[in-house]
Amino acid sequence: MKKTILTAVVVLFLGVFSCSEDFTENPRLNVEDLETFFLKEENVESAIIGIYDLMQLNYGRDWHSAFLVKLLPGDDANAAGGNSEDQGQLQNIDDYANVSSSNVSIASVWDHFYRTISLSNLVIENIKDSNLGNKETALAEAKFLRAWSYFELTTMFGDIPLRLTVPTSAAEFGIVKSSREAVYTQIELDLADAIASLPEKGALSDNFRVSKGAAQALMGKVLVFQEKHTEAIPYFQSVISNTAHDLEANSVDVWSINNEFGKESLFEIGYVSTTSRDWGNIAWGGRNESNLHIQLMGPRGDGIFDLTGTGLINGWGFNLPTGKLVTAFENAGDVNRKAATLMTEAELIAGGGSVDPSAASGGAIWDYEGAIRIKYATNPDDSSTDGVKELNYSTNFRLFRYAEVLLLAAEAYNKGGQDAAARAELNKVRSRAGLADVSTSLSGNALFEAVVNEKFLELAHEGQRFWDLVRWGKASSELAGTGYSSTNDLFPIPITEIDKNSELTIADQNPGY
């Protein structure tokens, strides 16, 4: 069952953003006073749904989604689209070229994560001393979502403003950057509280909500990113030992609409097709509730890709697999997982389809390296017959799943000197993919490299690859010849934030921008 995530009333009555000019003396209309709003359990529930709704918007906002912004610096996907100037801000991220503090997609991701944090702060501040029956669970959800947002932000931007209260005037928006270490400390505090009060996966009141296992898994991931491998292991063990969490039987099952919010899912953003979008009511830049990115990322039409035999329909051509990813699958003999991730041109033609570069701009398909994407595919069964089909995909984004937990655990065990345990977790993922166990003699750095390669294959097109390469110190070697430089390890702080935040100056900008 999928539940429609509605925009909460609370989002409307206080526009608390990363740094905003929205403060005004004029009262907002059709809203309830803050002093009374949070006295009702149903209003607290609406506010929590509002936080999830902001997450949904951020990861699925037309051309400026966190999904694409996190994904495109990696070596598993190309921006693609119609040509080198199609959504230039995304092409720049993909090509490490002309990435600036005015990049609108990067700025959107920053702003929407801080909006999510602001609403989380609003909930926490207003119910922490209450006697509401749903207080503990609501606090836990708000703290998880705040922790998630700060983890995403510090991963992409490094040192950032750490805001834990709700500003009541424009003057209070001025806040200095905190170190990444300080941000991590707060994330750990929030996750500890979330773990203490969130229900287990099997006891969730709604399937889209985060569970205790999700918080434990995220805590482990945050610790691994800090190279606190031994500390991370107990959190992963708690998730792995809980029978509510497991791998789907086959790789392709992970992406089936029938398995959304399934046993492999730890944190998932839900979308629906029931809003019946068409070309007249589609809300560009707004909350559509459907996942427009599925259409955006489908193989381009206009006579370029004939998808006969695939069961898919054409899209707008963004997010094509790299040739490097295709080679990695083939070198690993990874047939099953490859088929759930991408399709080569030869496979497309063998199935009855075709590719016609002459139909593309300039006679060449931009950023095409011989394969189309199958993960998050344009499956017509995942859309609605109401409205315009390509505007109504209900495919969810799986942001955090059990397979990643197993690979993070394998990394933690390996770095902690427990190679037998690392091999055991790694082999679970390989077995699901139809691959043989790694050798029992594989250990040390060679075993770590096996984990690195497994993550490349398992998490392709999920936005993890680049940030792993950076933290592992592998970006310069793996991305050699692409235009990458160490400047690209972090995104620039948006110039809009520096302009509006009285405690930030150009000197606070990340190096190289």
Image: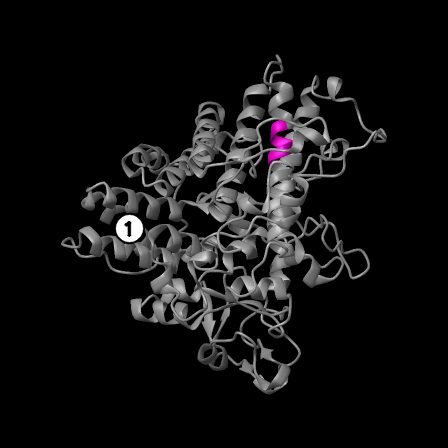
- Point 47% across, 76% down: residue: 369
In the displayed structure image, the side of residue 499 where residue 70 appears, left or right: left
Q: Secondary structure at mark 1?
A: helix
- Magenta stretch contains residue 118: yes
> How far across and how far down the image is residue 301, in percent?
64, 75
> How far across and how far down the image is residue 406, in percent?
34, 45
Quadrant containing the N terminus is: top right
Q: Is residue 195 visible?
A: yes
- Magenta stretch contains residue 113: no
Pick the front one: 162 or 86: 162
> How far across and how far down the image is residue 415, in percent?
24, 44
Pick the front one: 271 or 202: 271
Tag 1 residue: 426
Pick the front one: 428 or 100: 100
In the rendered view, how is the structure colored? one colour
The boundaries of the magenta stretch are 117-121
Relative height, residue 157 to residue 164 (above, below): below
Relative height, residue 448 to residue 14 (above, below): below
